[in-house]
Image (cartoon, rainbow, N blue to C red):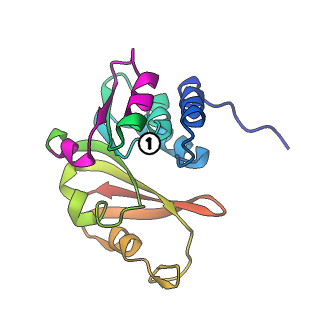
Amino acid sequence: MSAPPELPEVVSRAFAVSRQAGYVSFCRNETGRLLAALAATRGGTMAEFGTGCGVGTAWLRSGVRRDARILTAELDPKLATAAAAIFDDDPLVEVLAADWSTLLDKGPFSLLFLDSGDPKAVAVDAVADLVEEGGIVVLDDFTPCELWPPIADGRVDTLREQWLSDERFTSVEVMVAPDASTIIATRR
């Protein structure tokens, strides 16, 4: 069995900042590699709602092209400050210490990365108009489910059901690890 691939330098820095801040909720490497690959296909402006300490942002940055930029918003000012330090000298990344709603007038976005933890905030109707035609939405932190409708914690997972069936998007759930899946939705 071979060793896992090296982490991009910016991602290693973000993990170090997360450890130093004691922040343990961050983008998994499997999802991060997917984000980097998708970011490499995008120009324009990408956004992330909920920066944390910047691990997801770092994964996006590791794949971003020179004709793109990343905006990310974090409500907790301490976490936003920690994340911003990672990208101090990087003109392609802007970290805002603010609620994600401050990004509403900065779209449409070519790629939008969301954490599924707040279903109301990341519902299809809440963000659909923030994504340009052909733009991609990535939602992480799902547990794989082979049933339809999808079930999570003994209930219908309405967020996943919305994203996988909304006619404004072509969507797929992708397993990134045996215990984790991500939804990728492309705006029609």
Extreme-right residue of the structure: 1
96 is within the stretch colored magenta = yes
Viewer-nearest residue: 81 or 180: 81
Place of residue 155 in the rendered image (x, y in percent of width and height, measured from the top left): 46, 84
Q: How many numbered marks are there?
A: 1
Name the spot of residue 88 as percent of width and height, x first.
39, 18
In the rendered view, tell whether residue 101 sits above or below residue 72.
Answer: below
Q: Name the residue under label 1.
A: 52
**Residue 118 magenta:** no
In the rendered image of this protein, does residue 8 appear above or below residue 128?
above
User: Is residue 108 in view from this perspective?
Assistant: no
Please state the horizontal and vertical placement of residue 14, each as a whole percent of the image.
53, 31
Please tell me in which quadrant of the rendered image residue 52 appears.
top left
Residue located at (58% from left, 32% from top): 20
Q: Going 68% across and 30% down the picture, which residue do you hit?
A: 6
Amino acid beneath label 1:
Gly
Q: Which residue lies furthest to the top in this view?
A: 89
Q: Characterize the local packing of mark 1: few (<14), some (14-19) or many (20 or more) Cα atoms within 10 angstroms.
A: many
The stretch in magenta equals: 80-104
Measured from the top left, where is residue 56 in percent x and y?
47, 40
What secondary structure is found at the residue carrying circle 1? Answer: loop
71 vs 27, left or right, is: left
Q: Quadrant of the N terminus?
A: top right
Q: Quadrant of residue 2?
A: top right
Residue at horizontal 38%, vertical 75%? 161
